[in-house]
Image (cartoon, rainbow, N blue to C red):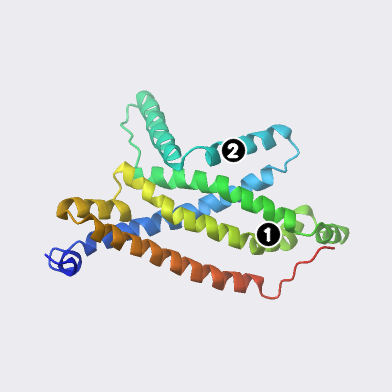
Amino acid sequence: MGSFELLFGSGGWSGLLLRGAVVTVLLSVVAAPFGFGGGLVLALLRSARSGLVRRLCGLYVWFFRGVPDLLSLFLIYFGLQALLTWVGGFTGLRLDVNAFAAGVIALSVVVAAYSSEVWVGARAAVPSGQVEAARSLGMRRGLVFRFVVMPQMVRIALPGLGNVWMVLIKETSLISTLAVTDLLRAASEASRATSRPILFYVAAGSLYLAFSLVSWMGQSVLERRVGRGLVLGRT
């Protein structure tokens, strides 16, 4: 059977690949807001007055940036399973970890660690004179952050967050180890069933590249829109 028939013919594997691609996109889209939002919170807490809070946040970032992401996935997945088993022992309920949810949590935790560094750099790049000027006008700290600091942080952080997003798309493939049929696992199943690994892994790679291309184009548009009319300068 030819390559076209294996992919698009009757009984072809394109449907499984597309369903796996949808899972990959869903993982990325769901994990990104939690990861980027968590990274922002970490970045702000790393400048907190409490030394303990700063050290704990630094330890979090150091740990999850230092261990392999696959190990983080296993720790969270099996850790959640152990926690639910412990809770079930008290409640009498049988609780199991959803592999997709565990993947989202693990990816969010890792992305938060990486994106926090981006947010820290963006915060440091906002001219301090602008903050001081806003405070001198009587603006409260929350309003200064909302209307002066945060818009500029977003603009500065976008390129770095875009890079983290690209990494996130590829890191979703790790969830295939938890028997979730994402794009990589779909390609693996098709290659085992047909003994044509090159065909299906190339097809999967093409879809990943397509995701990256669309993401790059979207990031470029977003950077132009966010940066429109915004000029940063040291004061």
**In front of the other: 91 or 129:** 129
Residue type at mark 2 is Trp
Whole-angstrom CA distance, mark 2 to mark 1, is: 23 Å
Which numbered dot is residue 166?
A: none
Residue 51 lies, with reference to residue 232, above or below; the image says above
SS at mark 2?
Answer: helix
Residue 13 lies, with reference to residue 43, above or below; the image says below
Residue at the (32%, 47%) spot, across then down: 176
Residue 145 lies, with reference to residue 219, above or below; the image says above
Q: Is residue 14 left or right of residue 218?
A: left
Label 2: few (<14), some (14–19) or many (≥20) C-alpha neighbours in 10 Å: few
Residue 161 seen in this snapshot: yes
Question: Residue under circle 1?
Answer: 153
Residue 182 seen in this snapshot: no
**In front of the other: 101 or 71:** 71
Residue at the (26%, 54%) spot, across then down: 186
- Give the mark nearer the N terminus: 2 vs 1: 2
Q: Position of residue 114 (x, y in %)?
A: 56, 48
Which quadrant of the figure contains the C terminus? bottom right
Q: Position of residue 20 (x, y in %)?
A: 30, 57
SS at mark 1?
Answer: helix
Q: Residue furthest toward the front? A: 198
Question: Residue under circle 2?
Answer: 62
